[in-house]
Amino acid sequence: MGQDGNAAPGKILQSGTHLARIVAVALPDGTFEAQVYVRLTREPEVAETYIPAGTFPTEREAWEAAEERARRAFSEHEF
């Protein structure tokens, strides 16, 4: 779910039994917020844990930051 309570589209990354959904959300000021949602594959989507990954001037930078943060969540078992 996005911060507004609606399911947000995104890209799914998987590492073993862990999933991360990453999203780059356009903000009203023209910047982009990188968002990461993590969970175990056996858990429903409502069990996702939100990890903020920062605000960036471009969408590309937000996607890159979200992916980097998701990989860190995998390596540090942040679920």
Image (cartoon, rainbow, N blue to C red):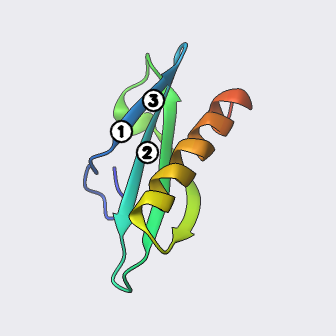
Q: Residue at x 35, y 56 (%)?
A: 2
Which three-letter amino acid code belongs to the residue tagged 2? Ile
Q: How many marks?
A: 3
Q: Are marks 1 and 2 in contact (CB under 8 Å)?
A: yes
Which three-letter amino acid code belongs to the residue tagged 3? Leu
Q: Residue at x 44, y 69 (%)?
A: 58
Which three-letter amino acid code belongs to the residue tagged 1? Lys
Tell me how far mark 1 sits from mark 3, CA to CA.
7 Å
Tell me how far mark 1 sits from mark 2, CA to CA.
5 Å
Determine the secondary structure under disc 1: strand
Q: Nearer the viewer, residue 75 or 40?
A: 75
Q: Pointer 3: what residue? A: 13
The answer to whether residue 32 is visible is yes
Q: Badge 2: few (under 14), some or many (20 or more) residues near its Cα, within 10 Å?
A: many
Q: Is residue 3 above or below residue 79?
A: below
Q: Pointer 2: what residue? A: 22
Residue 22: which quarter of the image? top left
Q: Earlier in the sequence, mark 3 or mark 2?
A: 3
Q: Residue at x 74, y 32 (%)?
A: 76
Q: Pointer 1: what residue? A: 11
Tell me how far mark 3 sits from mark 2, CA to CA.
8 Å
Determine the secondary structure under disc 3: strand
